[in-house]
Image (tube, rainbow, N blue to C red):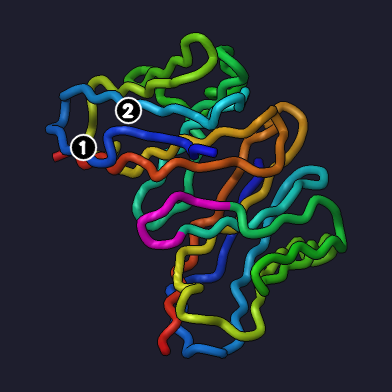
Amino acid sequence: EAGVAQSPRYKIIEKRQSVAFWCNPISGHATLYWYQQILGQGPKLLIQFQNNGVVDDSQLPKDRFSAERLKGVDSTLKIQPAKLEDSAVYLCASSSRIGEDEQYFGPGTRLTVT
Amino acid sequence: GNSVTQMEGPVTLSEEAFLTINCTYTATGYPSLFWYVQYPGEGLQLLLKATKADDKGSNKGFEATYRKETTSFHLEKGSVQVSDSAVYFCASRAGGTSYGKLTFGQGTILTVHP
């Protein structure tokens, strides 16, 4: 079974530029999560999808971050414009259903904003 | 809101030493508790879990017991190996409107020397 795929693995941009990350969850997984992991901290949930609907986006900075999950499969997370404090690893995870104990994580995208 | 606090790291041990990584939580109600591990170059993966008080989660020689009276979920292993070197994250998941959302601790880096 293929795991959660993310791309790119690394991205360096200047502040005020825009960037997008892509996630392909495990096939058949209805629930998809985006986390932000700042160096030295644990992951923090940004947004959670159930199929193509948003379940929780309470910690998503909506003035600059957006996410979508068209057709309930792949998802993209966008930052526009980026700030220095957005430097972090962005993790995508999926689970077979909402409330499922195990979330399966992708390798993450390391973003550096200069 | 929910929060998870892990012991300060990093932790450096010799092979076959005893390991304890402390984790305490605050939550309303009775959360489920997890330990995730991140090996170098890999994504986070579930190590063990406990869903109610006094449950013991175990996997790969690691154990953790859900202690409601002390709001703790300490990770232990009797004899660590070099291959256990990784970052360990304690996490909680509450029900209700946060169903599915994981709250992570800051992570503890473990290095095991031969």
- From the image, give the main secondary structure of the stretch colored magenta: loop
Q: On the rendered structure, is A39 left or right of A60?
A: left
Chain on which label 2 sits: A
Residue contact at pointers 1 and 2, CB within 8 angstroms: yes
Q: Work out which residue is located at the far top of the displayed protein and give it.
A: A71
Residue A37 screen position, x and y as percent: 41, 45
The residue that appears at 80% across and 50% down in the rendered structure is B51
| Quarter occupied by residue A75 | top left
Span shown in magenta: B39-45
Question: Disc number at residue A11?
Answer: 1
Residue visible at 71% across and 70% down?
Answer: B63
Q: Which mark identifies residue A21?
A: 2
Q: Secondary structure at mark 1?
A: strand
- Residue A98 % position (x, y): 69, 28
Q: On the rendered image, what quadrant is the N terminus of chain B found in?
A: top right
Q: Nearer the viewer, residue A78 or B39?
A: B39
* Residue A82 image label: none
Please, is residue A89 above or below residue B83 in the view? above
Amino acid marked by disc 2: Phe
Q: In the rendered image, which quarter contains the C terminus of chain B?
A: bottom left
Q: Give left or right: position of B80 versus A34.
A: right
